Image (cartoon, grey):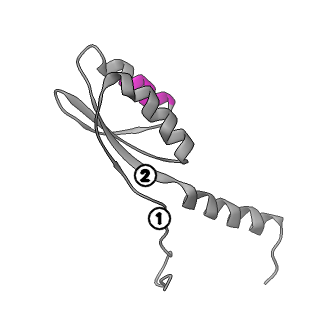
Amino acid sequence: HKINLQTGKFILHQFEGLHKLWDTPKVSATPSTRRNIKDLCDIMHVKIDDVSAATLTVELADLPQQINLFLEMLRPFGIVEIARTGLIAVQKGAASMN
């Protein structure tokens, strides 16, 4: 197989995703802080998964440094809990990585 510049870029792009972590923090959200948290999520491209009267649960997949930065910005609001995965990879198609 020939590997050209485009193929190399594609392969590198595929491996970039393997360095991401998935975090799902739940943060306290009062009526007065909800807008600020939503604005922060918009700026950081973070998805809001769940909304309750007292909390917002968000989902983000990014490099550890970006996740830690986002969590530091959330801390003043009060982080209730966090679920975090490690590095993950799954083979596409019918084949498996075994």
- Seen at 56% across and 42% down, the residue is 65
- Start and end of the magenta stretch? 37-43
Residue sitting at the far left: 53
Query: Quadrant of residue 8 in the image?
Result: bottom right
**Label 2 crowd (10 A; few <14 / some 14-19 / many >=20):** some
91 up-or-down from 31: above or below? below
Q: Which callout, 2 or 1, points at the residue further toward the start of the chain? A: 2
**Numbered tag placed on residue 88 in the rendering:** 1
> Looking at the rendering, in which quadrant would you find the N terminus?
bottom right
57 up-or-down from 72: above or below? below
Query: Quadrant of residue 82 in the image?
Result: top left
2 up-or-down from 27: above or below? below
Q: Please report contact status of discs 2 and 1: CB closer than 8 Å, yes or no.
A: yes
- Seen at 33% across and 40% down, the residue is 25
Residue underneath mark 2: 22
Give the percent coordinates (x, y) of residue 43. Answer: 50, 28
Task: Residue 29: say if magenta.
Answer: no
**Label 1 crowd (10 A; few <14 / some 14-19 / many >=20):** few
- Seen at 38% across and 19% down, the residue is 36
Question: What secondary structure is found at the residue carrying circle 2?
Answer: strand
Q: CA distance from mark 2 to mark 1?
A: 9 Å
- Seen at 75% across and 69% down, the residue is 7
Give the percent coordinates (x, y) of residue 30. Answer: 23, 19
Q: Main secondary structure of the magenta part?
A: helix
Question: What secondary structure is found at the residue carrying circle 1?
Answer: loop
Horizontal arrangement in the rendering, residue 18 relative to residue 12 (left or right): left
Q: Nearer the viewer, residue 30 or 72?
A: 72
Looking at numbered disc 1 in the image, what kind of residue is underneath it? Ile
